[in-house]
Amino acid sequence: MPNIDFWYSIGSTYSYLSVMRLADVARATGVAFRWRPFNVRHVMILQNNIPFRDKPVKTAYMWRDIERRAARYGLTPRIPAPYPLAELVFANQVATLGVEEGWVEGFTRASYRRWFEACEPAGEDPNLSASLREIGQDPARVRDAATSDRIAGALARATDEAMALGVFGSPSFVVKGEVFWGDDRLEDAIDWARAH
């Protein structure tokens, strides 16, 4: 079975499209995806690559593009969603804990659904607690664990690993060192995984 590392950051708008369809894609293709949260904001600041700041025309295009692509996948976002996320880093620390404990997929999907379909920013309440309760996790316990130096360090290390691989944006799909950036490159990543 081919394996693909799915590098994403809760806070990335286009990652909504991948997050919400990846389980179906995995079932349909037999590809296994390893969910790898990282801090895309840190990467973008280091690389002086802030894509939508002070760019209203590009921002408007982004929202319309997501809306068009979402319809193709049967998704119904309320556009525009709150953006940028104030708690991007914390949301990804929670996801990092979820990787360790085995509930990252469910949490990420629940967070994105509430962010894009209920306009509740991810990483803060009511989204955070509701998403955690939905997947059977205690919000108070998770909040305490996710703010630990250990989890903050794990997210920082994952972000360094992403940069070392050449990941510069979210979502990215990495197959044996090959980086495919963007939801629209998911199928290319699958083809590469099968061929190599």
Image (cartoon, rainbow, N blue to C red):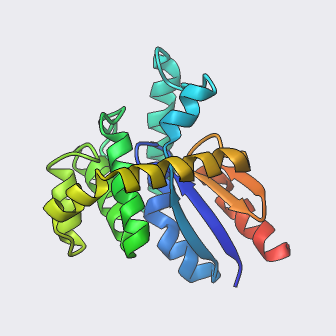
Is 183 situated left or right of 147 in this image? right
Residue 153 or residue 176, whichever sits in front = 153
Image position, residue 143 (x, y; %): 22, 56
Image position, residue 190 (x, y; %): 71, 68
Looking at the rendered image, the quarter that the N terminus falls into is bottom right
Residue 65 position (above or below residue 131): above
Residue 110 sits in quarter: bottom left
What residue do we see at 40% from left, 49% from top?
A: 152
- Residue 75 visible, this orientation: no
Image position, residue 3 (x, y; %): 67, 75
What residue do we see at 43% from left, 68% from top?
A: 99
Q: Residue furthest top?
A: 54
What residue do we see at 42% from left, 59% from top?
A: 96
- Residue 89 visible, this orientation: yes
Image position, residue 42 (x, y; %): 51, 34
Residue 61 or residue 112, whichever sits in front = 112
Residue 88 or residue 159, whichever sits in front = 159
Residue 136 position (above or below residue 165): below
What residue do we see at 35% from left, 33% from top?
A: 83
Looking at the rendered image, the quarter that the C terminus falls into is bottom right
Residue 181 position (above or below residue 111): above
Is 168 situated left or right of 131 in this image? right
